[in-house]
Amino acid sequence: MSPATANIPAATANADIVIAMHNISKWYGPFKALDNVSLDVRKGERVVVCGPSGSGKSTLIRCINRLEVHQEGQIFVKGLEMTDNVKNIDAIRRNIGMVFQNFNLFPHLTVLENLTLGPMLTRQMKKADAEELAMHFLRKVRIPDQARKYPLQLSGGQQQRVAIARSLCMEPEIMLFDEPTSALDPEMIKEVLDTMIELAQSGMTMIVVTHEMGFARTVADNVVFMADGSKVESAPPEEFFGNPREPRTRAFLDQILKH
Amino acid sequence: MAATSRTTTYDPDARMAPGPWLKRNLFNSVGQTALTIVTALILLRCLWALLGWGVFNAVWYTTDPDVCRAATGACWAVIVEKHRPMLFGLYPYDEHWRLALMMAIYLATVVLSLWPRCWNLRLLVPLWIVAALSIGILMFGGVFGLRFVPTADWGGLPLTMLLFTGTVLIGMPVAVLLALGRRAPLPVARGVSVVFIEALRGVPLITILFVAVNVFPLFLPAGMEVNRLLRITVGIAIFFACYQAEVIRGGLQAIPRGQYEAAASINLGYWQTTRHIILPQALRICLPAITNHIIAAMKNTSFVIIIGLFDILTATTAVMQDPLWRSFYVEAYLFVAGVYLFFGYALSVYARQLEKWIAEGRI
């Protein structure tokens, strides 16, 4: 597994690395949300980012597809740098799907329309083709029978699986998950995690912000721990959970694993 | 959609039989009973007087105003006698059939356009082109052996309809653009929208119309002229748009940030996001307030009096100058009020139906 320490030299040289973040910093006013964070993600790698709330983990992954704008450092996705350039943003977002804590499905469209909108508008797919693609992914997340319903008629777990399918319809190479199970009732968490595990097994590159340590243990190649906007530690799960180096990581794991 | 689970408010009267309901709400104490009886007597007296004036003693049909003068009730005959100049204004009397036909085409087009089953651009665009062309030919004439009638002679209900339709058709897109502009990422768009909205909202409609009619032509190059009717329509439309823009902005602000982020994450651009994600939700949210302003716009059309055009209200005022019939102006104005009420109420009913369809997730 990658050592993933700070100061990685010109990571873009390595063809395997699909996301390279060098020394990212970001401020909200006087508050420093990200403090000199570096992270590399290789093709097919599953990275879990964890840490206490307010530690900047969501902000970090939201910088990757520019839902947040970083102020210092560089982000490369497949060798392309994320800048103000609209063409770059467009090209990078094309490769990245994202799943949100609150699902963010479009409530005025049916499940099927939620899924076909992106392919039809941004990939000029014909309606029939887009619907075929959508049904394919709805079968993957095991809710093809809900296609004609509106999102608010579904349970939280079903909505989140629709959201995953919506991202997959864009056929991205990388998927970002921003606390995908935090808004779910406990009995629905498993169905979403199962979907994510299947996705991981298919070889998708994934960055997952989550508190689900069981998921991190079974799926992650690399677990990153963040606190106060900094990357405190990153290690493969056996090492991260079995033998955490940093006292702050240990304190966090003690707290979260006690229950 | 979710709204099918709309909560019912607690209503203690809902399941009561009429007897207990009366006792509870109208005859609960001596004072309340007395008040109920007095109010009922006053209401009955008013109703009796109204029926006596409006129905029992009214003159329904006569060509002789003296018959009306002799009667103690209303003179509805004035409407029968004067309905054509009231409804059609100064338009040449022999050509009134063209206006009647125009109204039929207009109403059919509008009714079809409001019907969700017809919401298909491949149907609506040709429909409106054909309707606009035939209405234009009927109103202007000058072809197919029809006599030419300049816009200065247009009047009455068709004029009111044209002004209202023009106001909404021009005003709504401008309103949407202004509302979007006010929240746009571009400072220039934001600035222009804010100045436009605040400046025009702050002045009375009559001022805008005065500028459109009397001041605007001064800025045009010599010899160039823009039709007065068009100028006034655009004036009313822009006034309408400024108010409507603020209503729509309210709807836009109600859309959670997550919707924009989700749209960005599937790589939609600004206009795609606006067109497919944001506006459909925002317009649904502020539909009741939009309806409000549309009904107000219908009534604002009567401001064309200031350029000497005879919409249905002004036409009626003019007709009532007839010395033989002028004493029956109350009946004439009641008729005009009835026409406004009919169209205003039809708009309300339609808007309520739209809200119902939205709640059911049908549109």
Image (cartoon, grey):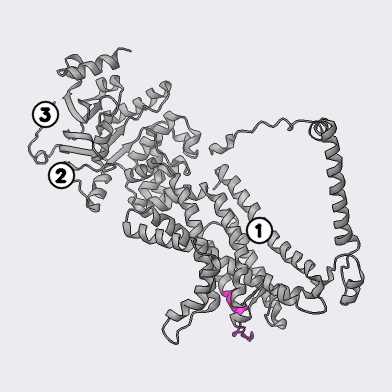
Q: State the mark number for residue A79.
A: 2
Q: What is the span of residues highlighted in magenta in the rendered image?
A: B133-149
Q: Residue B232: name its quadrant.
A: bottom right
Instruction: Single out the mark in the foreground, 3 or 2.
Output: 3
Give the secondary structure at mark 2: loop
In the image, B52: left or right of B213? Answer: right
Q: CA distance from mark 2 to mark 1?
A: 61 Å
Q: Label 3 is placed on what type of residue?
A: Thr
Q: Position of residue A191 (x, y in %)?
A: 39, 25
Instruction: Return the residue at label 1.
Output: B344
Q: Quadrant of the C terminus of chain A?
A: top left
Amino acid identity at mark 2? Gly
Label disc, if present, on residue A5 of the rendered structure:
3
- Residue B93 in the image: state x and y as whole percent: 72, 82
Of label 3 and label 2, which has the lower sequence position? Answer: 3
> In the rendered image of this protein, does residue A208 appear above or below residue B359?
above
User: Quick check: can you spot residue A77?
Assistant: no
> Alpha carbon of mark 3 to alpha carbon of mark 2: how far?
20 Å
Mark 1 to mark 3 CA distance (whole Å): 70 Å
Work out whether residue B66 can be spotted: yes
Write the residue at 37% across / 55% down: B271
Q: Seen in the image, is B195 located left or right of residue B284? A: left
Residue at 26 percent across and 49 percent down: it is A90
Where B151 falls versus A168 (above or below)?
Answer: below
Viewport quadrant of the N terminus of chain A = top left
Find residue A203 and report its horizontal and vertical position in percent: 24, 32
